[in-house]
Image (spheres, grey):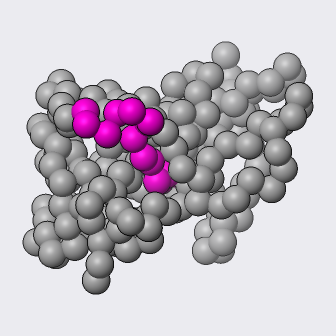
Amino acid sequence: MTVPKSPDLPSSSGIGRWDIVADVPRSILIQDDQTFRDTGFVYICSGYLVEHGRVLLVHHNRFDKWVPPGGHIEPGESFAGTAVREFKEETGLLVQAISSQPAVHPADANATPEPVPFYVDIEREGFATPALVQFFYVQRQPCTREQSVAAQLEEVHGAAWFGLEDLDTLKTFDQVRSLARFALLNYPVAEERATS
């Protein structure tokens, strides 16, 4: 089956989307009743959990760096649902996504609001196809506060909590360092935030 390319869409940087991904394999398709379209990206969602002024990160097997728990979207999942599932798979913790924005319209028979990520970017390092990544704040589900972190070693080398003082020397990507610092200072549950 031949999958038609979607038209070249300009990005905010002025670079066409296909200019970025012209020579790399694309693996995510969108299908509706009449068309197949290649998105040109893989979709990844991650979560930032902040408790007692510390953020939980996992040591990624492939990158050999500390990153927020996260991974690829599965068929039928929402973006927030992916962040929640991946968080459980990598840390053993049951969490729920926290929207970074208020709901504009209440849930009804036609539309259900979904949590909004606090940051979105396109990542290229370590990906054959650029990854469109959404970052959500997450919090533990009710009645699971005492649950211990249990890193899933088939997914990650380990999991650990880090404070602001740890970020400058942490083996991670610059972008993770920036997002972890932002999450520590701006987490929606104010009493969990770090103090600068």
Left/right of residue 20 with respect to residue 158 in the rendered view: right
Q: Name the residue furthest bottom.
A: 196
Looking at the figure, which quarter contains the C terminus?
Answer: bottom left
Give the image location of residue 110, x and y in percent: 89, 31
Give the camera-side residue of 52 and 128: 52
Residue 114 picture quarter: top right
Give the image location of residue 113, x and y in percent: 74, 43
State whether residue 79 appears in this view: yes
Is 135 within the magenta? yes
* Residue under the point 38% across and 66% down: 191
* Residue under the point 42% across and 46% down: 139
Give the image location of residue 34, x and y in percent: 86, 22
* Residue under the point 67% across and 16% down: 1
Residue 177's place in the image compared with 145, above or below, is below
State whether residue 72 appears in this view: no
Give the camera-side residue of 137 and 129: 137
* Residue under the point 54% across and 33% down: 81
Residue 189's place in the image compared with 115, above or below, is below
Is 167 within the magenta? no
Q: Which span is picked out in magenta?
A: 128-147
Q: Name the residue furthest front.
A: 143
Q: Name the residue furthest top.
A: 1
Q: How many numbered discs sit on the rendered protein?
A: 0
Residue 17's place in the image compared with 86, above or below, is below
